[in-house]
Amino acid sequence: MEKYKFINNSGDFILNSPEKYSGLYFPIANSAGMKSAVTPLLSGDAKTDQNTFILQPVSIRDLADSRVSRNFWLYFKDSGAWSVTGASSKQEAERFSDTSTDESFLEAGLLWHKITRKNKSNGIKAEVLSFCPETDDTVELHKVTITNTGENAVTFKPYTAIPLYCRSADNIRDHRHVTSLLHRIKVLKNGIKIDPTLTFDERGHRLNTVEYGVYAACCDGSLPIGFMPSVDEFIGEGGSLTNPQSIGSALPYKEGYCLNGEECIAAMQFEDKVLNAGESISYIIVLAVDKKRNLNIQKYLCEEEFDRLLETTKEYWQKAAISHIHTADKDFDNWIKWVSAQPLMRRMYGCSFLPHHDYGRGGRGWRDLWQDCLALLLSDPNGVREILVNNFAGVRIDGTNATIIGEAPGEFIADRNNITRVWMDHGAWSTVTTKLYIDQTGDNELLIKDQVYFKDIQACRAKDKDTLWNDSMGNNVKTDSGEIYYGSILEHLILQNLSVFFNVGEHNIMRLEGADWNDGLDMAANRGESVAFTCLYYKNLLDISAFIADLKAKGKQILLSKELFTLLDYANGADYNSIEYKTDVLKRYCEAVKHCVSGERIAADPDMLICDLTAKAEHLKQVINQNEIISCEKGKWYNSYYDDSGRKTEGVINGKTRMMLTGQTFAVMSGIADEEMINSITKSADALLFSEEIGGYKLNTDFKEIKTDLGRLFGFAYGHKENGAVFSHMAVMYANGLYQRNHAEEGFKALNALYKAADNFSRSHIYPAIPEYFDPKGHGLYSYLTGSASWYMMTVICEMFGVKGKNGALVLEPKLLPEQFDADGTASIEVDFFDRKIKVCYQNQNRLEPNKYSVKEVKINGDKISINNSCGIDRNMIPTNGECVITVELA
């Protein structure tokens, strides 16, 4: 199998005969809300949200099964119909035969896609260039260019043929035919428009407000000469979309023709074309979802404007890439551009709307909200403060949170389908993101900014309901007097972390509740416990203590709600070894805030807070290190969970060794594991979980049991999804923890295995990107929209290259391995740091290992500067305008 090849330093690549590889799809989207996917045959869907699909929704299986595509046909008198996109029954039948006269190759870059197809018998080359322009309009653009590569003139009839769906994804299996009866189709001079009468929903039908359309023009200024908007009429009796009877015939309908109540196709015929040898002709096609009903289509049908928009869109996505790096591996430098653009793709698509992502109804969840901010902090920190403050509005007063993000900033929804469920890890991510924000910006006054709390019927960490609450009371916590209550961001953080501290199971480990990061652990709500995330909360408590110390140093007053002091109990003779004591404290607090709060805020003693949080953290560390270390013939590591039968999930069970990666990741990252344990963990993980050919570290060994007392994941085939796949997100976080603990070689091993597996096209079968996971065959699945991209970039920038902030100062602590430096001993990275674009060039002439080198000399634009031991560079020393090159000598 041929590999794609990068052709420049911008991430652009080419691939021959892409249609011969199953399951390939490519994202094209814009920030206005157009979300599309295209395949080598120009299949794939296009939409703006769950209820607004202009093309028929597709899942990954449909890519091979469906005949729907954005087709463009040429009809030759002698040889008949030929699909520019390769989507004809004849071309499909010949694809793997010696009789095929087609050759094709793909050229693509950051969210633009061009398929070139040559037909030797007709002497024709066709290019289809596709993208969604970075404008305020939800449109998808295509330019089809036909070139005569032969020696003689050729004549052909050109047709567009794009089936239109124009309704909600729900209607695929919910009144598919009935909803087609709502279609009101009209032929315009330059296209076909659909304006459905209603949005069909048996819970309450509504008047439709969206216009859909496909519009086309030849670049010589001519418009279509004939139309046929009915799918049935276009394909003909017994025909199909890949063998339609109408190609070659005159399409009879003209401007003004109307059709009601049928499935629609944008079938448009242009005048016959004669191309002499070497001549070309181009056609512009626009797919439009017009929610405002004021779209200026004509501007998009101009070739000059198309070309201009292509360049501005390319520039937009190049800037969207978080960083640009230079190492000895040029393919890695290009591949990482795609990874660095993935966080923006996820903000556009949410967690749905690509062929593998056939679940949910759009939008992002709570965890996504915080982790996507990690990447935003590294690329465009402007406005992140406001985003973070808005995010905290989703925290409940019991420490849980809303799980669905609304469309407006700071808007939250309780849960889809009103399912009462708590993910116990949710409270951890806000501290992780806030720490990065403060490190990068030095803005710890964010912590004393006030914000509301989210309120709904759910109370006491989903164990109870507030029967006094109803929708008319709004979605914010109120005081006894009916005023909306505001607490500081610091108060939100303390509450999120302390509510889980007291919420423990029978082993004094934080309860798993509905699940943690691993959504598949969803069947242990009664007795399940998460050692893994108890480790992360341990680190959070220490980080919050450091926040408080910094506020104290600045003389800032810390106000906390009166009720919160119930959880700040260390000075009152707290007994953290007593599970009954802990659960009683949490119960008393939750009852006190179940319906409303007093509104009284009390100035807290910073030293008391630091002492309390530190004592709680040390207690967690002691419990974990005393009780959760697994030691057996195969090695030594940490138990990750307890199941709903109250049993450890790891160790030697029924004669089989069980190990999970999640517990090791957070034990290492948090500092729970000491140096001896880190060495033991890495050896055990290498022996039990590592498989280089499929991407590195698996989530778990094969338990060979359907554990209905732990989670649905054990019903999956082993090696897929959360049951033992190489799951990129956890593998990257494992690498991040290893780098943080100065195990650069081991961290690089984890990151590099993921890159090598993704870049190995013969196995991965994916375009450049980091996928959600690799299956047992090494295939990459669920590309583009994975949170692992944010963590991968954060690890590369902040740990591998060591370019990071510390209270707003720039710190340089590289952990690059000798083989990552080029032939001249140089490696570099370009990033944004606090509104400043910087390029950091490391010089390691002697090719020393990370533990053997340190920063010897630093120059900014050639001028040597003095540095302290941690190489902290005051950001005011960094030029705000023009080039800023920081040269760092390592010795």
Image: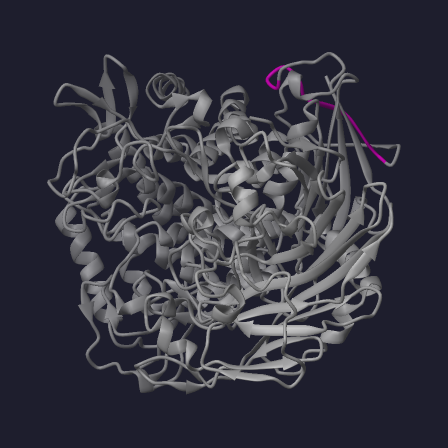
The residue positioned 27% from the left and 71% from the top of the image is 593
Numbered disc total: 0
Which image quarter is the N terminus in?
top right
Q: Position of residue 406 (x, y in %)?
A: 45, 70
Q: Position of residue 618 (x, y in %)?
A: 33, 38
Q: Is residue 319 left or right of residue 358?
A: right
Residue 870 visible, this orientation: no
Q: Position of residue 135 (x, y in %)?
A: 70, 67
Which residue is more in the foreground, 88 or 412?
88
The relative height of residue 635 versus residue 180 in the rendered view (above or below) is: above
**Res 237 → quadrant:** bottom left
Instruction: Based on the picture, tell me whether residue 852 belongs to the magenta stretch.
Output: yes
**Res 463 → quadrant:** bottom left
Which residue is more in the foreground, 311 or 287?
287
The residue positioned 25% from the left and 27% from the top of the image is 702
Q: Position of residue 257 (x, y in %)?
A: 61, 84
Residue 490 visible, this orientation: yes
The residue positioned 76% from the left and 67% from the top of the image is 271
The residue positioned 59% from the left and 45% from the top of the image is 40
Which residue is more in the foreground, 79 or 803?
79
**In the image, which residues are magenta?**
850-860
Instruction: Based on the picture, tell me whether residue 679 belongs to the magenta stretch.
Output: no
Q: Is residue 355 left or right of residue 335?
A: left
The relative height of residue 873 versus residue 470 in the rendered view (above or below) is: above
Which image quarter is the C terminus in?
top right
